[in-house]
Amino acid sequence: MVQAYILIQTEVGKAAAVAGEIAGSPGVISAEDVTGPYDVIVRAEAENVDLLGKMVVAKIQNVEGITRTLTCPVVHL
């Protein structure tokens, strides 16, 4: 299982709606609107890196109001 944090920038005023819509998606552990350079932080998991990438590109990036994402895979050192 691969987990990642997905940092999301949204259009002004869209953070709560974006977090709410993403929160119900399969593979999403949590989705919270935050302050700072990013508007929403998502923790997600998938069976492998390829499926994680597909989730980000096909599902998360298609949510209306998102302008940019940055995916940060969790590593265990």
Image (cartoon, rainbow, N blue to C red):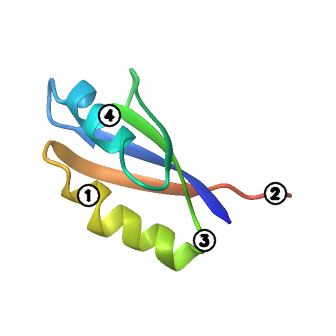
Q: Mark 4 points at which residue?
A: 19
Crowd tier of the residue under label 3, counting other residues whose Cα lies within 10 Å: few below 14, some 14–19, many 20 or above: few
Identify the amino acid type marked 2: His
User: Marks 3/4: CA distance?
Assistant: 22 Å
Secondary structure under badge 3?
Answer: loop
User: Marks 1/4: CA distance?
Assistant: 12 Å
Q: Residue 76 carries which label?
A: 2
Which numbered mark, 3 or 2, is in the foreground of this view?
Answer: 3
Q: Mark 1 points at which residue?
A: 61
**Between 31 and 41, the one nearer to me in the picture:** 31
Q: In this view, does 70 lie to the left or right of 2?
A: left
Crowd tier of the residue under label 2, counting other residues whose Cα lies within 10 Å: few below 14, some 14–19, many 20 or above: few
Q: Give the mark nearer the N terminus: 3 vs 2.
A: 3
Check the picture and name the quadrant holding the N terminus.
bottom right
Which residue appears at 39% of the width and 20% of the height? 35
Which residue appears at 49% of the width and 55% of the height? 27
Q: In this view, does 43 lie above or below 13?
A: below
Q: Is residue 68 left or right of residue 28?
A: left
**Between 45 and 67, the one nearer to me in the picture:** 45
Which residue appears at 30% of the width and 55% of the height? 60
Where residue 72 appears, as percent x and y from the top left, is 55, 55
Q: Mark 4 and mark 3 in contact (Cβ < 8 Å)?
A: no
Crowd tier of the residue under label 4, counting other residues whose Cα lies within 10 Å: few below 14, some 14–19, many 20 or above: many
User: Marks 1/2: CA distance?
Assistant: 26 Å
Q: Mark 3 points at which residue?
A: 47
Check the picture and name the quadrant holding the C terminus.
bottom right
